[in-house]
């Protein structure tokens, strides 16, 4: 069996594809034995070890992980740094580029990758292209946030993907610059997401769940225990993309 050649330089497209996987894979699976890593390695004609190393290099760009001592290669990680910086400068563009490359390398339609119901889209044209871009980026954001929290609700620990939401801390429409920032996201179950979105629930500076006092009094009745029992509970922290405390405070102020 012929092993993939590792002598050729990594291209920007390859770096962007690894970044895409970095955002979508739980931190604990960033190793050469993970099926997702093996699959991407085959697509790129690389070894799983080299893809896993690139994933770890991307980790070293995350300031929270760096503070925990997570390090990549000391040298030779220029491509990862450039892609990371591109994402920080224009996250919507880089996210869409990464999904477009996934479609290109896998031979799948972009609409299928983003799980878009094409019957909901207008006919071909600029409006369709705009809607596809928005839906693709929303799917990317959801994938990144759920992966960061290991596909578990950060309040209750619920691990049923169909019942989980990538909730924006600062709403999508309020700040375009934060739309694709995974640090502006929380993985919540659908009920707590609704309470958070309606500003009935918020997080304090210690990332503990709080409900507005008037709603606590209003909801103290049978059947509401599952929602309210988390009052004062600290959320389970993500393995990467820790929520931005400045954004948490913006949301909390709007709730108080």
Image (cartoon, rainbow, N blue to C red):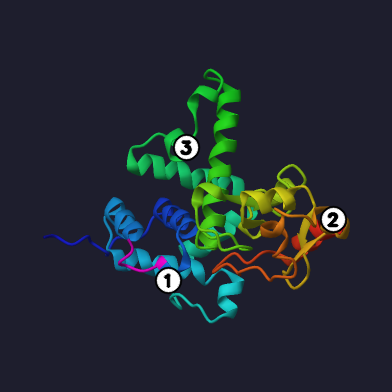
Mark 2 or mark 1: whose residue is earlier in sequence: 1
Circles 3, 2 touching at the beta carbon (< 8 Å):
no
Disc 1 packing (10 Å; few <14; some 14–19; many ≥20): few
Which span of residues is magenta-colored? Answer: 29-34
Locate residue 230, reporting x and y percent.
Answer: 70, 65
Q: How many marks?
A: 3
- Residue tagged 1: 76
The quadrant of the picture occupied by the C terminus is: bottom right
- Residue tagged 3: 115
Disc 2 packing (10 Å; few <14; some 14–19; many ≥20): some
Q: Magenta stretch: dominant SS? A: loop
Q: In terms of secondary structure, where does tag 1 sit? A: loop
Which of 5/61 is in front? 61
Disc on res. 255:
2
Q: In terms of secondary structure, where does tag 2 sit? A: helix
Q: Residue furthest front?
A: 222
Q: Find the distance from the CA under tag 3 to the CA under tag 1.
A: 36 Å
Q: Residue furthest bottom?
A: 69
Locate residue 238, reporting x and y percent.
Answer: 57, 67
């Amino acid at each position: 069996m012929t092993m993939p050649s590792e002598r050729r330089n990594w291209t920007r497209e390859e770096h962007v594809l690894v970044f895409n996987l970095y955002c979508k894979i739980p931190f604990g699976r960033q190793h050469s034995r993970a099926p997702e890593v093996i699959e991407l390695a085959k697509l790129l004609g690389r070894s799983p070890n080299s893809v896993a190393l690139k994933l770890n290099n991307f980790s070293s760009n995350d300031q929270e992980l760096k503070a925990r001592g997570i390090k990549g290669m000391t040298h030779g990680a220029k491509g990862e740094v450039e892609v990371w910086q591109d994402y920080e400068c224009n996250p919507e563009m880089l996210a869409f580029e990464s999904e477009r490359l996934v479609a290109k390398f896998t031979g799948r339609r972009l609409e299928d990758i983003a799980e878009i119901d094409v019957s909901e889209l207008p006919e071909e044209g600029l409006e369709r292209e705009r809607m596809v871009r928005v839906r693709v980026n929303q799917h990317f954001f959801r994938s990144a946030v759920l992966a960061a929290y290991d596909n578990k609700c950060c309040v209750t620990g619920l691990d049923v993907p169909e019942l989980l939401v990538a909730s924006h801390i600062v709403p999508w429409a309020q700040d375009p610059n934060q739309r694709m920032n995974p640090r502006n996201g929380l993985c919540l179950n659908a009920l707590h997401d609704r309470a958070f979105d309606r500003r009935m629930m918020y997080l304090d500076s210690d990332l503990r769940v709080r409900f507005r006092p008037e709603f606590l009094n209003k909801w103290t009745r049978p059947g509401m225990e599952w929602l309210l029992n988390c009052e004062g509970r600290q959320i389970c922290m993500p393995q990467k993309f820790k929520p931005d405390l400045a954004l948490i405070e913006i949301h909390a102020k709007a709730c108080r």
